[in-house]
Amino acid sequence: MKAVFVLFDSLNRHLLAPYGGRRVPTPNFDRLAARCKVFDRHYVGSMPCMPARRDILTGHLSFLHRSWGPLEPFDNAFPELLKRKGVHSHLVTDHYHYWEDGGATYHNRYSTFDFVRGQESDPWKAMVQPPWQRLREKYHARQLAMFDSAPHHKAHIINREFIRDEKDFPSVQVFAKGLEFLETNRAADDWLLQIETFDPHEPFYAPKRFKDRFDTGWSGGIYDWPRYGRVEELPEEAAELRANYYAVVALCDDLLGRLLDDFDAHDMWKDTALIVTTDHGFLLGEHDFWAKNRMNLYEEIVHIPLFVHDPRNDSAARISRLTQTIDLAATFLDLWNLQPPTESQGISLLGSTARDSLLFGYFGGAVNVTDGETSYHRFPADLRTQDIYQYTLMPTHITTRFTVDELKSATLAPPFDWTKDVPLLKVPVIERSPMYHNYGPGCLLESETRLYDLLNDPGQSAPLHDQKREALMIAKMQRLMKENDAPPEAFERLGLTTGAPRGIRGI
């Protein structure tokens, strides 16, 4: 068996032609769909980037216990499990979060890895005295204000000076290196190749030939990085931001096409599995928001694309059963007839076993549940006074270690059923935590518990007032939280100690 896993970042399902998208031509996603099982009800688990990847690699939800952080010593990552069984796993990526404090244990689980530099705020090029005045003149004032409020993002201004021709773009290099792996190892067996690009994650920077397809007539300076929050831009500013996102999606479609060309040219469909998906979506003004992290987890963010080709069962089909990111680990193991670890919650996508509901969320925010027909989003009564802890043996955030203030009150918690009898540090969440204002307690702009009918209100524009339906979703939430061995305070912060509905607030 051979397998290729393509992982995009922030790829919106509803923009892809196989899912009804029309704004961006995506002919190569259409080509892919013609050869694959297309999953219609596939969802995220833990959010955002690295929590999603921990779910993907381990097959276990993490957001009820931990925010953004490394793989833990007790985590089973499927590339490493494959490696132990003689399957060579290779990662090629430009996703620079793997090389930060909060992601540094992920890429070492693969047999080999290749890293392309330059995406977003990757501290790549060493320019000690940048010509800031000249560089700033290129950018729109709103984007400059964002850079000034988050100075680490200024690395992108420098990186961009070295990304000019199409061949320089990190995502283009990633796919080229992926094709190089295929050329080198085409005759070999028992390998997994993960081609992972940060695109179409912001900033939405694409080669000119893709940007020209979505020209808005904009002349106000580079404007391709929306703020996380409410839409406050003028219509022409919002149009330019969206156009730049569309351009990167078109680039991603083109890159996918290069891989499909290779599959066609070498008849790889007969002996090579192919799985294509993303970690989450991205709001482009829907619900009057940009991005993610700050708002309720709407369908545009959590309902994501998934395409699966199994050479042993290569008929194309639409799959309607409920699936999520934790199912990927079990699927890759299944390709080599390996059983997932006992703590895995994932279900192989190659079978027909269905789940009736699933959980998703951010650490410190709402706990969310859907059965594919209804979505329920339950927030604590007060985000800032909730009792919540990080459970970890790897106390690092995205780009820093846990602070001394955070760790001063840490205690040792007994093992969970997924930690292999290993106790964990139990670290109180405090406002001085570096992550407090990134997502969760300190940054949410919406915190009202809501219930939506996804069949009759797919845009989630009208929350329901239905106590009976809410009670059913609460029961599903409680059961799934128990199956995840959620800590007691995870129930208490939501008022779920007794399971009695608290009522939907604020709607």
Image (spheres, helix red, strand yellow):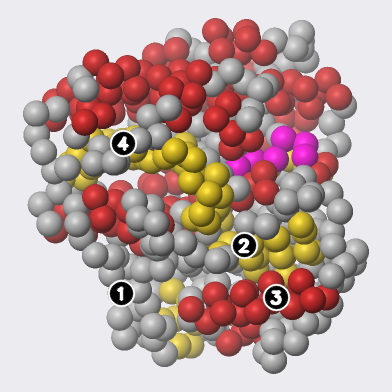
Give the mark, 3 or 1, whose residue is nearer the N terminus: 1
Query: Which residue in the protein does label 1 denote?
Result: 342
Q: Amino acid at mark 2?
A: Asp
Q: Amino acid at mark 3?
A: Leu
Q: Indicate which disc residue 249 carries.
A: none
* Mark earlier in primary sequence (2, 1): 1
Query: Which element is circle 3 on?
Result: helix
Residue at coordinates 39% horizontally, 74% vertically from top-left? 393
| 282 drawn magenta | yes
What's the residue at 57%, 65% (across, down)? Answer: 357
* Magenta segment: 280-286
> What's the CA distance linking mark 3 and mark 2?
10 Å
Q: Nearer the viewer, residue 290 or 157?
A: 290
User: Residue 490 is drawn in which quadrant?
Assistant: bottom right
**Between disc 4 and disc 1, whose residue precedes?**
4
| Picture quadrant where residue 394 is located | bottom left
The one of 377 and 251 positioned closer to us in this rendering: 377
Q: Of tags 2 and 1, which is closer to the observer?
A: 2
Choose the circle earlier in sequence order: 3 or 2. 2
Identify the residue position indicated by label 2 in the image: 371
Instruction: Single out the mark in the foreground, 3 or 1.
Output: 3
Q: Are marks 4 and 2 in contact (CB under 8 Å)?
A: no
* Residue at the spot of label 3: 472
Kindly state the secondary structure of the residue where label 1 is placed: loop
Residue type pointed to by label 4: Asp
Question: In this rendering, does residue 150 appear at all?
Answer: no
Mark 4 or 1: in front is 4
Alpha carbon distance from label 4 to label 1? 29 Å
For disc 4, the marked residue is 314
Q: Please rate how many residues cluster around mark 2, counting C-alpha atoms within 10 Å: few if below 14, some from 14 to 19, many from 20.
A: some
Which tag, 4 or 3, sits closer to the chain's start?
Answer: 4
